[in-house]
Image (cartoon, rainbow, N blue to C red):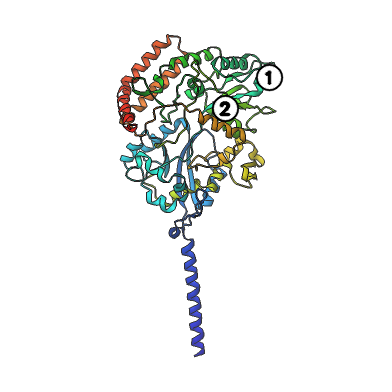
């Protein structure tokens, strides 16, 4: 009898052990818990899933760095998520072409960006997964950053397909070397005339005092945003001509017509000023063909005295490692007024058309959503921005956003090649690592640039004519802009010819639809 009792006790003990183990497994199983913590808000970090076979998750993004294909940040990301994470990283200018090619060949990654150009067409073709319920269940960081904003995207009217960018874009502004101003005895420019004089002195008066004629005034490339402040001095919100952008800078004419920024009444006035700078060799001589990173290099290496860019680069992210001069250059951000006292830069605002979508053919949507959500966490964004803590960086004063890069990663090129700073904008939270680490001057510069946003006619609804004619219209404007800067022919005649071509290519129809939609969206 005692023997039977002992056996029963043993059986009961084993049952209890299995029950406790089962409860613990259920508690820790991402399939049961949703794989995420829900404490706090955007600082919540997604708990890495633990499938028996790690999911293969691929994503696509654009940038102008050159990360190693198998860098340590990607490896660490895969380790933390217990997934095999791979990326298709393309130059910004090639994004639209690359995406179109992958759509045609049915080789889209699990997560990829869309910008509104073809997003509705792609949606109708069944390329996007509807992820509303999955986001609510598995993506606390995405929901806390975006929440109701997801429903405001036109493409999400019948479900959640597009996850909007939660990071507010930075505005352009002139970053101008104040150490060169001091060397030359010049004041900060305040208008177009004094800006010309500064660029001239930077080019011909030996601002670095090395006895050589080896400098020029302004970094520039083929994008009109290289001269955003100059266009702004004429009240024009310049639009990028990069193929990957659809951030439209529409304007309203006196008769109420909504049209392209390039038909602003003072467009040619701005062009004439830029032509004057070019004729005197005051900006990048290879502006028409120079790659973005090579353009930056002219600033880093002490060749150029100014750059029209988000100040977070010149005064924060590149400081001091990217600069070859000792001491490193110093900058400030001039406000340049035009003949009528007008000034400003293209406004910075959230887009309801741009963000990331999930491939409808993704084999593991739950894992893809969890991965995206981790990237939007404080922990995930920190990894994508600074790299691996203890290996690539350490915080020196985390509360005030101060850190130090370690060892070989003190070199910015090595840091980026290893994955640091390269992927951080992918599902970045609104309050992200970059904003946490700005120095005081950069923080002030960001505020100043955003406060200088020029008025424009923003349209939230995707336009059918844009989908139909947009590529051809953009190509004409891009060619027109480049031609106007260098043409030996009459500028007004060349301009009129391009505008006529633009109108024939769909511009007139687009203007009509844009004007009607704008009136509806702004009806009282």
Instruction: Residue at 65% x, 21% y: name it.
Output: 180
Mark number, residue 183: 1
Instruction: Residue at 45% x, 43% y: name it.
Output: 59
Write down the residue under mark 2.
296
Label 2 crowd bin: few (<14), some (14–19), many (20+), radius 10 Å: many
Mark number, residue 371: none
The residue sitting at the bottom extreme is 1
1 or 2: tag closer to the N-terminus: 1
Residue 497: where, in percent of width, then height?
Answer: 36, 14
Q: What element carries label 2?
A: helix
Taking depth in this image into account, of 143 and 162 the one nearest to the observer is 143
Instruction: Residue at 31% x, 22% y: name it.
Output: 508
Residue 77: where, in percent of width, then height?
Answer: 53, 48
Q: Locate the C terminus by quadrant.
A: top left
Q: In this view, does 384 lie to the left or right of 455?
A: right
Residue 277: where, in percent of width, then height?
Answer: 53, 14
Taking depth in this image into account, of 10 and 191 the one nearest to the observer is 191
Q: Is mark 1 on a helix, strand or loop?
A: helix
Q: How far apart are marks 1 and 2 (CA)?
A: 22 Å
């Amino acid at each position: 009898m005692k023997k039977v009792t002992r056996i029963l006790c043993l059986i009961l003990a084993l049952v209890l052990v299995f029950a406790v183990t089962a409860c613990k497994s259920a508690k820790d199983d991402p399939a049961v818990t949703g794989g995420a913590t829900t404490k706090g808000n955007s600082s919540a970090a997604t708990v890495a899933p633990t499938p028996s076979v790690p999911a293969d998750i691929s994503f696509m993004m654009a940038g102008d760095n050159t990360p190693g294909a198998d860098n340590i940040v990607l490896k660490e990301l895969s380790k933390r998520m217990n997934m095999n994470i791979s990326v298709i990283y393309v130059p910004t200018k090639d994004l639209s072409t690359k995406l179109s090619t992958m759509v045609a060949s049915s080789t889209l990654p699990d997560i990829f960006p869309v910008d509104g150009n073809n997003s509705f067409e792609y949606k109708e073709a069944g390329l996007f997964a509807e992820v509303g319920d999955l986001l609510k269940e598995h993506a606390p960081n995405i929901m806390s950053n975006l929440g109701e904003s997801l429903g405001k995207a036109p493409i999400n009217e019948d479900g959640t397909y597009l996850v909007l960018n939660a990071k507010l874009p930075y505005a352009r502004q002139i970053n101008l070397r104040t150490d060169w101003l001091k060397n030359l005895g010049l004041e900060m420019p305040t208008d177009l005339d004094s800006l010309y004089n500064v660029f001239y002195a930077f080019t011909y008066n030996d601002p670095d005092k090395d006895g050589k004629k080896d400098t020029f005034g302004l970094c520039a490339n083929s994008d009109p945003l290289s001269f955003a402040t100059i266009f702004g001095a004429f009240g024009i919100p310049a639009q990028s001509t990069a193929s990957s952008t659809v951030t439209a800078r529409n304007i309203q004419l006196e008769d109420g017509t909504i049209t392209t920024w390039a038909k602003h009444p003072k467009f040619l006035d701005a062009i004439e000023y830029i032509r004057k700078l070019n004729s005197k060799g005051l900006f990048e001589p290879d502006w028409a063909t120079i790659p973005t990173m090579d353009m930056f290099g002219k600033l880093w290496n002490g060749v150029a005295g100014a750059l029209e860019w988000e100040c977070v680069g010149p005064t924060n992210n590149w400081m001091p490692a990217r600069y070859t001069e000792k001491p490193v250059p110093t900058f400030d951000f001039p406000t340049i007024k035009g003949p009528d006292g007008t000034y400003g830069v293209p406004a910075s605002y959230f887009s309801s058309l741009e963000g990331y979508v999930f491939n409808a053919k993704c084999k593991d949507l739950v894992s893809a959503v969890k991965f995206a959500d981790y990237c939007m966490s404080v922990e995930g964004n920190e990894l994508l921005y600074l790299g691996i803590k203890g290996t690539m960086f350490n915080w020196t004063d985390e509360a005030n956003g101060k850190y130090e890069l370690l060892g070989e990663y003190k070199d910015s090129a090595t840091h980026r090649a290893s994955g640091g700073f390269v992927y951080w904008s992918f599902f970045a939270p609104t309050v992200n690592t970059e904003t946490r680490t700005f120095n005081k001057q950069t923080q002030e510069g960001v505020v100043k640039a955003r406060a200088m946003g020029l008025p424009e006619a923003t349209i939230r609804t995707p336009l059918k004519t844009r989908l139909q004619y947009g590529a051809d219209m953009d190509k004409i404007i891009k060619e027109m802009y480049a031609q106007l800067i260098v043409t030996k022919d009459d500028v007004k005649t060349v301009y009129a010819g391009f505008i006529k071509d633009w109108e024939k290519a769909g511009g007139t129809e687009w203007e009509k639809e844009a004007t009607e939609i704008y009136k509806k969206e702004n009806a009282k």
